[in-house]
Image: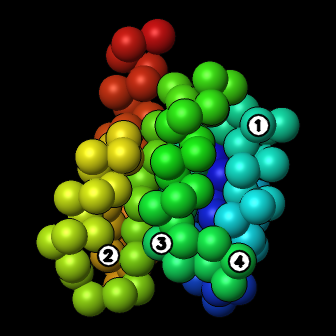
């Protein structure tokens, strides 16, 4: 799994929660790095923050879904901003699997497990 989030504390929390769930996590700290890693790693899943110092997560998502090399990788968008109906609608319209609030890593892990389970069923 690729975790694209510039907050190092968030990365560590997700790594710890993910390790308990058996997920191997690689982190990207910029939008550009997220795009680069997605192409080179071809992860099973991407968790994408909505805000980066160098990019808007919605733009990164649009680029991921427009690129034939990454368009089939499921993406969960998550944000520390207050839940914004517009953000979630835009993310889903751009092809995100789901939109998750950043306030609870366990909710994120449960959603990740559901997406990965669906992927295994269709494989």
Residue at image position (52%, 66%) is 57
Left or right? Give the position of 121 relative to 28. left
Marks 3 and 1, the one that precedes in the sequence: 1
Does residue 59 appear to the left or right of 86 in the view shown? Answer: right
- Which element is circle 1 on? helix
Mark 1 or 4, closer to the camera: 4
**Do labels 1 and 4 touch, CB within 8 Å?**
no
Q: Can you say whether 62 is above or below 52 in the image?
A: above
**Looking at the image, which is closer to me, 9 or 47?**
47
Numbered label attached to residue 54: 4
Q: CA distance from mark 3 to mark 1?
A: 19 Å
Q: Using a 10 Å C-alpha cutoff, classify the residue at mark 4 as few (fewer than 14 neighbours), some (14 to 19) or many (20 or more).
A: few
Q: Residue at x 27, y 46 (%)?
A: 93
The residue beneath circle 2 is 101
Residue 6 seen in the current view: no
What's the distance in space between the residues labelled 3 and 4, CA to CA? 11 Å
At mark 3, the secondary structure is: loop
Element at badge 2?
A: strand
Q: Nearer the viewer, mark 2 or mark 3?
A: 3
Crowd around label 1: few <14 · some 14–19 · many ≥20 (10 Å): some
Foreground: disc 2 or disc 4? 4
Q: Position of residue 111 (x, y in %)?
A: 33, 52
Query: Is 90 placed above or below 115 here?
Result: below
Q: Earlier in the sequence, mark 1 or mark 2?
A: 1
Query: Which residue is at 40% across, 85% downward?
Result: 80
Mark closer to the observer (1, 2): 1
Tell me the tag on residue 50. 3
Q: CA distance from mark 1 to mark 4?
A: 18 Å
Where 15 falls versus 65 (above or below)?
A: below
The residue beneath circle 1 is: 39
């Amino acid at each position: 799994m690729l975790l694209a989030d510039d907050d190092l504390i968030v990365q560590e929390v997700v790594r710890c929660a993910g390790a308990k769930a058996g997920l191997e996590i690689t982190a990207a700290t910029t939008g550009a790095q997220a795009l680069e890693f997605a192409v080179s790693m071809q992860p099973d899943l991407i968790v994408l923050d909505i805000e980066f110092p160098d990019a808007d997560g919605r733009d990164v998502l649009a680029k991921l879904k427009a690129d034939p090399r990454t368009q089939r990788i499921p993406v969960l968008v998550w944000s520390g901003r207050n839940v914004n109906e517009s953000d979630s609608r835009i993310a889903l319209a751009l092809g995100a699997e789901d939109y998750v609030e950043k306030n609870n890593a366990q909710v994120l892990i449960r959603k990740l497990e559901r997406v990965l389970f669906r992927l295994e069923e269709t494989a």
